[in-house]
Each structure stands twice: as C-alpha cells, then as structure tokens.
Amino acid sequence: MSDLKVGLAGLGTVGAGVLRMLARQEAEIAARTGRRIKVVAVAARDRAKDRGVDLSQVAWFDDPVALAREGEIDVFVELMGGEGDPAKAAVAAALDAGRSVVTANKALLARCGVELARRAEATGAALLFEAAVAGGIPVVKTLREAMEGNRLFRVSGILNGTCNYILTRMADEKLSFAVCLSEAQRLGYAEADPTFDIDGYDTAHKLALLTSLAFGTKVDAEAIYVEGIRQLTLEDLEAADDLGYKVKLLGVAVRTDAGIEQRVHPTMVPKHWPLAQVSGVTNAVALDGDAVDLTLVGPGAGGDATASAVVADLAEVARGARPFAFGMPADLLLPAERAPMQRHEGGYYIRLAVLNRPGTAAIIAGRMADQHISLESIVQRRPVGLKAEPETANVILITYATTEEAVRRAIAAIEAEGVVASLPQVIRIEKD
C-alpha cells in the first residue's frame, strides 16, 4: 500500500483538526481508499506554537509557495485563506507542478476559480474544495456528481453560521442585533471585525461557487446582489413571526428567462419550510431540480466540520479521482447571463416609519398604486404600552408579487412626499 504524501499550509483550527482526524482515522481511510494518507510537510508562521498535535516527523517550510513547488508531496492542502498571495501563488504553483490541491479558500476560488481550474486540467491535477462551501455539508460533491440527471433551476441556502446564529437569537430571545452580535463574538462565532459575515460577502463567495456547479457558468462573484443583516431590527423579526415567517440571510441563485439571478439578502421564508427551521450556526442548502428537490443540513463552520470536508477530498485524491473542479471542463463553462436585480419578482415586506398626520395612509396607497403594486395587507404598529399619540407610526406593507424596480420607485415617491421619518426597511418574501 503506497502513501499519499500531503503538504499542508496553514495550521490553525482547521489545519490542526485535519492532522488529528487523519491520525485517528488512518486505518479506516487506508482500507477505503487503498492508500495511506500521510502529512509529510507543513508551512506555518510560528514553529514554536503548541497546536496539540505531534509535528516532530514532518518537514517545515517557512514559505508555503516553496512547499507547494518543491516539497516531496503528492497533494497540497491550502488552509491559509485570502484571495491573494501567498494562497494564490501556492495553489497555482502546486497545480502547475501537477500536484492536486485541496482548499477551503472560498474567497480565492470566487475570484480565481476558473483560472485555477484551467491550471489543474492542464497538468491532470485535481482541484477540490468541499470545505469552501457549507463546511461539513457535502454539497459540492452532491452538485458535481449526484445531480447530473437533473436540470436545476434554483439553489438557495443558509451559508453563514454567524448570521444565522444572530438571527436565531434575536427571534427566539427578543434581543437586539447589537447584543446578539456581541455574544457571537464572545463565543467565537464572529470575528472582531464581523463585516465579511454580517454584510453578506462570505455568503456571496459561497453562492458564486454553488452557481457555477449548479448551472455550468463561470464563477462570477461580481454578478451577485449583496445585502447584509446589520439593518434588521427586532421589530422586523417580530412582525415576520406574526405573519408566519422566519427571517434568514439567504444566498439564492435561480434560472430565469432573463438569465441567472444571484442574490444575497435577508429573506422572509414560511415557517414550515425546511430552511426556516434551521437554527443557530447550522447551515442548509436547498437544491431544486426538475426531477428531485433536496435539502442538505449540517454544520457549516468550525474546525471539525471543515476538517471533515478536507479529509473527504483527500480521500478522493487517494482513490485517484480527478473530477473537473466545477463539474465540466473550464473552457465549457459559460458566462452567466446576469439577471438584473431590478427585475426580481416576488412579495415584499416594507416597514415605513411615517409622520402621524392625516392623509399619510392615502399617500402611501396612492404611490403604491402608481407603480401597479397590489397590497396584501397594510398594518400600523405602535409600541406596546404607549398611551400618548406618537409623532410617528410604523406602517407595515405586505405586497403581492411585484418587481424590485416597482418597489424602489414607490418608496422613493413616498419619501418625496415628506411623510417618512427614517430609512425604510425592505425585506423580500419567498412564498410557496
């Protein structure tokens, strides 16, 4: 039985988890794949740091690019992160040398995935990235191999555990966004600078990869409409609950007559939907095809979940698998026809803080009618226990199916009337 010699760059939580998992499962993996997977070299910043694993028998490289290019390895595992160098240079060096690459780097793949896929194909190497999307959920393998009999028309999912944790705590415990974010940071679910997560960019990078796998298009993160969760209030989540919805940050890619629509934003989903029932840091991905619909649920982040996906990809390499990175040759991937967000059609939740004066409701209804928007309901909410007549009131509108452009035009017209006291809140609604 031969060894699959691995070089690993990045010895953080995930990298150390990979080493522990490979040691623990060595015999079982060898029996399943026919090869022993051995980490023979590593690259990390601090050689003296105690990582809780035995590194006495591995070669050390200060430069991950040198490890990828010159190390006596068969496969290079990149766990450093970042869309630029040294991660990009190291991955490119490994692929150019004919060494397969396993990575969890969604940012790198979202920006350079097609280019790296071409490099892999040129030398016969594999480029595998199960750990880059939804952690321990095997959605990449599912899309690449298990859905070939389907024509997919929609991929949607909860792809960021930090945001899902915050929204779950807000809804279940009636806490503010700021309180829940602080708690997420204390528990290690959110970074000190949480921008990448809460503003939707992490979800967008993952969605870009799923879109390519699902629809055979080139990875195009710039085509995604992105909106985060920091503007959401407890009042919005309570209103959603009263209306029979849960609010989730979703990444959605859908095939439309105008092209592929890719969007990331807070979404109201019916409570009975599987995605609505996914709580905490858990991730979920729904795949809707012409033959079957699947919903995959599992841990989307954390050392063990991500390490599990990395080890699964290493096992694929050990078996000799060399799948196309995005399910087909890179040169056959098509440019994605971008469906403008303005053409998006669906229901909308709109909350307006309006001046409490006669005629305001008529103005709102009139400007909505001007844009041919039909209202399913219009409700005025006032703070519980307030006895005096307030200067402003929250008016909540639920629309029937309309377009993004019509909603934005109507809101602008209402604001121009001088009756809106603060920035309007708009949340898109997914219905059965």
Image (cartoon, rainbow, N blue to C red):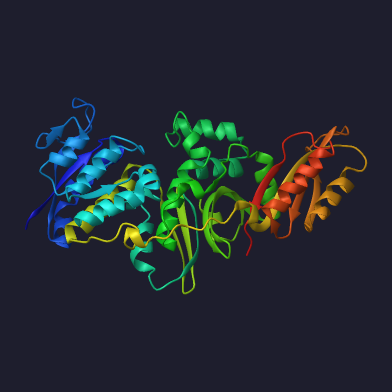
Which image quarter holds the C terminus? bottom right
Foreground of the two, 162 or 411: 411
Q: Residue at x 43, y 62 (%)?
A: 214
Foreground of the two, 290 or 396: 290
* 422 left or right, relative to 306: right
* 407 left or right, relative to 254: right
Q: Position of residue 408 (x, y in %)?
A: 71, 47
Q: Residue at x 30, y 49 (%)?
A: 116
Task: Look at the picture and state if 181 lies above or below 260.
Answer: above
Regarding residue 297, the answer to whether it shows in the image is: no
Foreground of the two, 273 or 118: 118
Foreground of the two, 122 or 180: 122
Regarding residue 108, the answer to whether it shows in the image is: yes
Q: Residue at x 44, y 46 (%)?
A: 205
Q: Residue at x 50, y 34 (%)?
A: 195
Q: Position of residue 127 (x, y in %)?
A: 27, 53
